[in-house]
Image: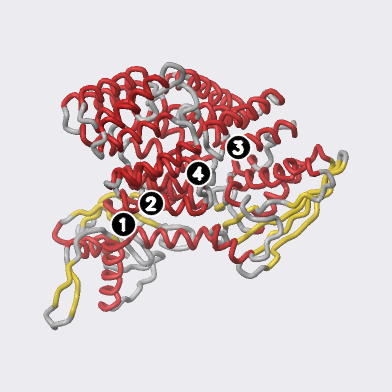
């Protein structure tokens, strides 16, 4: 099969039959002519598109150029997996001196294969049409089918202990099993924030499997007494309610991590997941020997996921206490880093106070465990805040390599670094991957809406954000982003309603600034200027970004004042919005202005400088 993406036209052939033709088909046939039996060869153009998606890169094998009809040379890439394709180098590429095209089909192991002209034509049509109208859908569906059987959700474990205070211990067992499984690249593992929505003994596993997009679920219970623990687990195939495996583990309390490791290894074996050496080692690692520290970490993450300034500060306290209980607990430092990085974004603190703490904590986590994907994600997030965008991307890539099922890595990579640098297709792919891994997470679903909004697909953004609010009507960030999308769509009155609801849920001066922008865009200058005064007063006692003032001045038509504030933010590197200056739709009225374009160039230049500086640091 030869696949290329290019023009395809409907025609009537010499036999007055409907047919298709065009450059897309011609090149697809030439690519196919370079292969032997069972080869799936891609044009370089198609391969470059697929290279943007991490899940396909391992299956792309560059062959170089091949000479076909009329001396034309085409660049081919061999696509194969364990289940399909042909991994052998095509004969034409083993005989580079050949100048005549080889037969379209030749047995890969020396046996000739006959193919009729009709069959060859069918292959050409299938390949060309698949490429021209949706080769990505073909690959995406193929990948979904391959991954689905090796997918699992670890549902909340039941607390059989008499003491209700053991609830966090029980959640810790569930979390650790899930975390270990998530490090296996060959598995799709749903995040705990999504599985926590389901009760411990659900009646309809088939429905849960469909909702979470998994084939298997793990249920369990934990009974803790004195210095002993009993863990019961059962692995179930969701669509048939078939028990694949069940066992009971009776151990001393100090051996609980060994139970979690054993359970994860057996599940990997039952689901026939392929493990690398590093993944096998990761399944056996004990994150901390201090159960109190682990429970504090779990409490912190639970509150951190609720995403308001107040909750982020509460989460930070739990993470700090976890680090105090166990100074060598790397995950505790990732929690500190992630909280400190987000507190200014939610209007609860100044970047100059929190960003340095975030960076120090992320670096500490990596000093303790360089193989921890969460730590690389924390550092990538901090580097983004400091405009080291290229280095941020490398850290996200490293994180995903280490822990491919960590939804926050995909979410932030797409929503932050890829979006800010204009890689919109990849940003959407990573954002949607985060939702696949954590389908009920409101922040992940909100960020998909944000990517739609920044790419000016406002109708899709609004639909996505409204859908998110249907399942979580009190989620601050979704109301905030929905307001932006509505205003950019041209309905500022509706936007103000969302901004006001967002303000009720989280105290952030930026949302007040968005109200001012909407008021000004509706011609209500008096109201807009009153909000400018409110922000100026607020700035005397708390951090207010220059961007907040800039957007109101911009809506009032005061471009110079808006640019003054944006330049201030860029100088001080304190605004969350400055890294997005290249793509922010709110700033579209400034595009083409020489002063604004100079500022964009300066920010991008500083980004390169920060990346170079960061790469020198140990």
Position of residue 253 in the picture relative to residue 84 (left or right):
right
Name the one closer to the observer, 400 or 30. 400
Closer to the N terminus: mark 3 or mark 4?
3
Q: CA distance from mark 1 to mark 2?
A: 9 Å
Q: CA distance from mark 3 to mark 1?
A: 47 Å
> Comparing marks 3 and 1, which lies closer to the viewer?
3
Residue at the disc numbered 3: 303
Q: Residue furthest right?
A: 226
Relative to 586, residue 260 above or below: below
- Label 2 packing within 10 angstroms: few (<14), some (14-19), many (20+): some
User: How much space separates mark 2 and mark 4, taking CA atoms?
Assistant: 41 Å
- Is 377 left or right of 15, judged from the image as shown? right
Q: Which residue corresponds to mark 1? A: 42
Q: Crowding near pointer 4: few (<14 within 10 Å), some, many (20+)?
A: many
Q: Nearer the observer, disc 3 or disc 4? A: 4
User: CA separation, marks 3 and 4?
Assistant: 13 Å
Image quadrant of residue 220? bottom right
Residue plotted at (35% across, 39% down): 419
- The residue beneath circle 2 is 60
Q: Residue 462: x and y, percent?
A: 36, 51
Q: Secondary structure at mark 4?
A: loop
Image coords of residue 606 (percent x, y): 31, 22
Other-residue count near label 3 (Cα within 10 Å), few / some / many at <14 / 14–19 / ≥20: some
Q: Residue drawn at (68%, 51%), measured in percent from left and top?
A: 156
Q: Nearer the viewer, residue 113 or 156?
A: 156
Residue most extreme to the front: 526
Q: Are marks 3 and 4 in contact (CB under 8 Å)?
A: no
Q: Is residue 435 above or below residue 420?
A: below
């Amino acid at each position: 099969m030869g696949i290329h993406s290019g023009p395809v036209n409907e025609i009537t052939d010499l036999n007055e039959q409907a047919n298709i033709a065009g450059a897309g088909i011609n090149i697809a046939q030439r690519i196919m002519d370079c292969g032997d039996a069972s080869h799936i060869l891609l044009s370089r153009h198609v391969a470059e598109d697929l290279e943007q998606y991490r899940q396909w890169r391992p299956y792309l094998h560059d062959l170089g150029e091949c000479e076909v009809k009329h001396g034309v040379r085409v660049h081919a890439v061999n696509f194969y997996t364990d289940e399909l394709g042909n991994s052998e180098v095509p004969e034409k590429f083993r005989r580079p001196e050949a100048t005549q095209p080889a037969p379209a089909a030749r047995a890969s192991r020396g046996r000739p294969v006959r193919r009729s002209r009709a069959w060859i034509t069918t292959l050409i049509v299938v390949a060309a049409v698949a490429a021209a109208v949706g080769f990505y859908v073909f690959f995406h569906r193929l990948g979904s089918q391959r991954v689905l059987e090796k997918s699992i959700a670890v549902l909340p474990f039941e607390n059989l202990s008499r003491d209700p205070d053991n609830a966090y211990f029980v959640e810790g067992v569930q979390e650790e099993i899930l975390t270990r499984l998530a490090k296996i690249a060959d598995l799709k593992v749903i995040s705990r924030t999504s599985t926590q929505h389901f009760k411990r003994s659900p009646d309809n596993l088939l429905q849960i499997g469909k909702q979470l997009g998994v084939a298997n679920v793990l249920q369990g219970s934990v009974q803790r007494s004195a210095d002993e623990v009993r863990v019961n687990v059962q692995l179930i195939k969701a669509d048939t309610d078939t028990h694949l495996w069940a066992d009971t583990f009776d151990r001393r309390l100090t051996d609980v991590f060994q139970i979690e490791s054993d359970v994860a290894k057996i599940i990997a074996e039952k689901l026939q997941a392929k493990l690398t050496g590093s993944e096998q080692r990761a399944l056996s690692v004990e994150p901390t020997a201090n159960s109190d520290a682990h429970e504090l970490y779990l409490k912190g993450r639970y509150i951190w996921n609720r995403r308001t300034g107040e909750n982020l500060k509460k989460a930070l306290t739990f993470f700090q206490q976890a680090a105090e209980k166990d100074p060598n607990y790397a995950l505790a430092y990732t929690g500190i880093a992630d909280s400190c990085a987000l507190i200014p974004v939610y209007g609860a603190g100044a970047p100059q106070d929190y960003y340095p703490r975030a960076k120090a904590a992320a670096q500490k986590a990596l000093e303790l465990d360089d193989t921890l994907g969460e730590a690389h994600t924390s550092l990538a997030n901090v580097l983004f805040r400091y405009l080291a965008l290229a280095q941020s991307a490398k850290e996200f890539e490293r994180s995903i390599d280490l822990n491919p099922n960590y939804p926050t890595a995909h979410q932030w990579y797409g929503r932050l670094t890829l979006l800010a640098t204009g890689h919109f297709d990849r940003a959407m792919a990573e954002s949607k991957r985060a939702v696949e891994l954590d389908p009920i997470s409101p922040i992940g679903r909100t960020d998909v809406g944000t990517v739609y909004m920044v790419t000016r697909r406002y109708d899709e953004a609004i639909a996505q954000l409204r859908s998110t609010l249907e399942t979580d009507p009190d989620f601050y960030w979704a109301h905030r982003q929905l307001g932006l999308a509505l205003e950019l769509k041209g309905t500022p009155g509706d936007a103000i309603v969302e901004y006001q609801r967002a303000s009720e849920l989280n105290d952030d001066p930026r949302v007040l600034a968005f109200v001012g922008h909407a008021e000004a865009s509706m011609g209500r200058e008096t109201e807009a200027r009153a909000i400018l005064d409110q922000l100026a007063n607020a700035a005397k006692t708390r951090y207010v970004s220059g961007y907040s003032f800039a957007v109101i001045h911009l809506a009032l038509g005061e471009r110079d004042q808006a640019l003054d504030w944006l330049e201030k933010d860029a100088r001080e590197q304190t605004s969350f919005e400055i890294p997005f200056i290249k793509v922010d739709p709110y700033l579209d009225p400034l595009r083409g202005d020489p002063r604004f374009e100079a500022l964009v160039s300066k920010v991008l230049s500083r980004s390169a400088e920060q990346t170079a500086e960061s790469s020198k640091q140990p």
